[in-house]
Image (cartoon, rainbow, N blue to C red):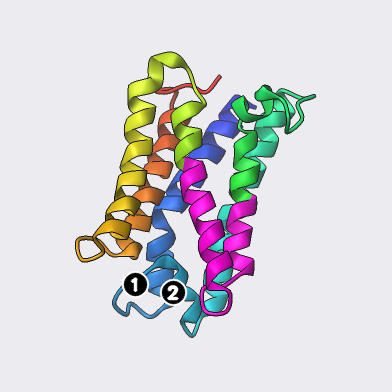
Amino acid sequence: MKNYIQKLEILLAVFCILIPIFLKIADGWKPFKPSISHYVLMENRHVFGMVITIAAMLFIYNGAIQLTLHSGYTIVTGKFWKNHGYNIILGLFLFGVLLFPLNTHPKLHYFFAVLFFVGAALSIAFFGDNHDKVVRYTIAVTSIIALGIHILKPSIINMFWAEWIALFVVGIHFILEAKGIISFT
């Protein structure tokens, strides 16, 4: 089962890292849009929906599989959060991003997007072994800094690149965890 989970985490990592490439291909290799969410406006918007759905389901499935290994935990126990239960919540946030598109429900869309990115950073930073703190904090802070720079000084980095950096570091987190370089147990 451990080998299966390792492969799942690496698949999730690679998928997160490649989301912008999948969307660029679906958009006919046109210049990158201002944000990943803007791909809902492309002609092949169904690909945007499919990609976000796959990412959400990978997060939810990863959380559910991890919790199955440590059965008996509910959302209110600390063990739920320690044993990857947060991935279920992150997957639900991605569904919020999808269900409330940028062009029709921008406030709800951004609400769920912020919850996803901040939630991912916080889960990386605070759920894990103490000996991995420096690596985990570095990964989490990199994600938050990229998004923060865009918010404070959008001329330096647009939202698309900030999101891609954040997805990249989330992907790196999953790879490091899957390879046993950092531990969350």
User: Which residue corresponds to the image point at 58% horizontal and 65% vertical from the top-left?
Assistant: 108
Spatial CA distance of label 2 from label 1 is: 7 Å
List x then y, in percent, for residue 76.
73, 30
Quadrant position of the N terminus in the picture: top right
Whether residue 99 is in magenta: the answer is yes
The 10 Å Cα crowd at callout 1, few under 14, some 14 to 19, many 20 or more, is: few
SS state under label 1: loop
**Badge count:** 2
Magenta span of residues: 92-120
> Which of the labelled discs sits on residue 38, or is there none?
2
Quadrant position of the C terminus in the picture: top right
Q: Which quadrant would residue 3 be assigned to in this image?
A: top right
Q: What is the chief secondary structure element of the magenta stretch?
A: helix
User: Which residue corresponds to the image point at 54% horizontal and 68% vertical from the top-left?
Assistant: 107
Tell which of 122 and 66 is nearer to you: 122
Q: Which quadrant would residue 65 be assigned to in this image?
A: top right
> Which of the labelled discs sits on residue 34, or is there none?
1
Tell which of 109 and 182 is nearer to you: 109
Question: Marks 2 and 1: CB-CB under 8 Å?
Answer: yes
List x then y, in percent, for residue 124.
46, 33
User: Which residue corresponds to the image point at 28% horizontal and 57% vertical from the top-left?
Assistant: 152
Q: Specify the amino acid type for callout 2.
A: His
- Is 164 displayed left or right of 59 in the figure? left
Tell which of 105 and 175 is nearer to you: 105
